[in-house]
Image (cartoon, rainbow, N blue to C red):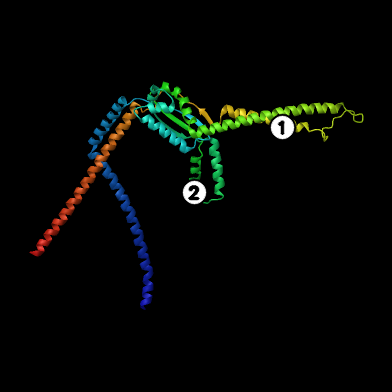
Amino acid sequence: MSEIEKNQNNNPNSDEIDLRELFSAIGNFFNRIFLNFILFIVGIKNAIVNNIKLLIVLGILGGLGGIVFHFFVPKYYESSLLLRSTYLNSRLMESSIDKLSQLAEDENKGSLAIALDIDTALANNIKGFRYEPFVSEEEIIELEIFKEQLKNEIEDEEVINRFVEQLSAANKSTYRIYIQVYDNSAIPKLEEPILNYFRNNPFVKKRLQISDTTLRLEYALIEEEEAELDSLKDILFNNIKVMGDRNRDGSNNVILADDQITNPISVFNESRSAYMKKLEIQRQLFLKPQFELIDGFTVYSEPASPGLIKLGFFGGLAGLGIASIIIIVSIFFQYLDKIEKKTRAAKEGLKRRMETRKV
């Protein structure tokens, strides 16, 4: 048998051996992972057993610290209102709330009292502010429709989701504004000052004034047009009456399509349309949808601050966390000591071998 034939006959066996070794290596890899995971669990168990006293002591101390903390930290109450404005974008809202929060954190609440136009005693009751965008069902539906439309143009869904999220964040018009106070009786007194704070923002105030002036001018113009339409209706009535009194070949019929008169139906339609526009303007002037309070503050009797049990529980968790950090640091240092001892032993062994060779 030639050398080539021998190699050909040996190839299948070598391939079979290679596959067997491959699957064996994969199995060993997963076995090592499983073994390391078990060793990790055992190590955690041993660490807990060996340091159980430390965990118990620090857990109890943390719980007691949380209970003590409850008695030294004043309680606070929280409430929220819903505000909608076409001129309050997310950046303006974030900037305004950040300013109020910084003023509330200041020990001297005089600047906060000036900003909200309230007395200092009321300002001293304020703990802080925060906000979050409020998405209505209509906005959710509109965004979903827009998202489906984008899918016809863009294939990458991740790009679509990112674009829709940015668009949603940039076009918020309704916000839930939270306020935290130390005395819940102060909550009703703060609703109007907070609304005035946002309403009197220079950016918002100018646009509200322009919108109000435009609506009133349009209302006055429609009233003038209505007066002219009323005069035209009187003329049409008189004209129709005169034409009805005429004798047209012995007939008293009034022909409205005559070129000498205007069709009264169109005049009445114009008058009705003007009246409907007046009603819509009156509705906008009354509701002021450009800046509208949807839901005001509600006074809650229960404080929003964490209670005794909650603080004790979280304090206990904090104590266990500190104990875990101590144990991890201790195990790490023990590991470093082992490495140092092995390194020192290896150096000493090498040194002894070198000395032996010299001898």
Q: Nearer the viewer, residue 272 or 335?
A: 272
User: Which sits earlier in the primary sequence, circle 1 or circle 2?
Assistant: 2
Q: Position of residue 126 (x, y in %)?
A: 39, 26
Q: Quadrant of residue 66?
A: top left
Which quadrant of the view contains residue 218? Answer: top right
- Name the amino acid type tagged 1: Glu
**From the viewer's perspective, is the residue at label 1 or at label 2 nearer?**
1
Q: Is residue 222 left or right of residue 309?
A: right
Q: Residue at x 9, y 62 (%)?
A: 356
| In the image: residue 259, left or right of residue 8 | right
Residue furthest to the right in view is 250
Q: Which residue, given by chain and number where applicable, does mark 2 sit on?
A: 159
Task: Depth check: give the residue in front, 89 or 240.
Answer: 240
Residue neighbourhood size for the residue with mark 2, other residues' Cα within 10 Å, grouped as few (<14), some (14–19), many (≥20): few
- Type of the residue with mark 2: Val
Helix, strand or loop for disc 1: helix
Q: Which residue is mark 1?
A: 270
Q: Is 342 located above or below residue 97 in the figure?
A: below
Q: Position of residue 14 (x, y in %)?
A: 36, 67
How much space separates mark 1 and mark 2, taking CA atoms? 49 Å
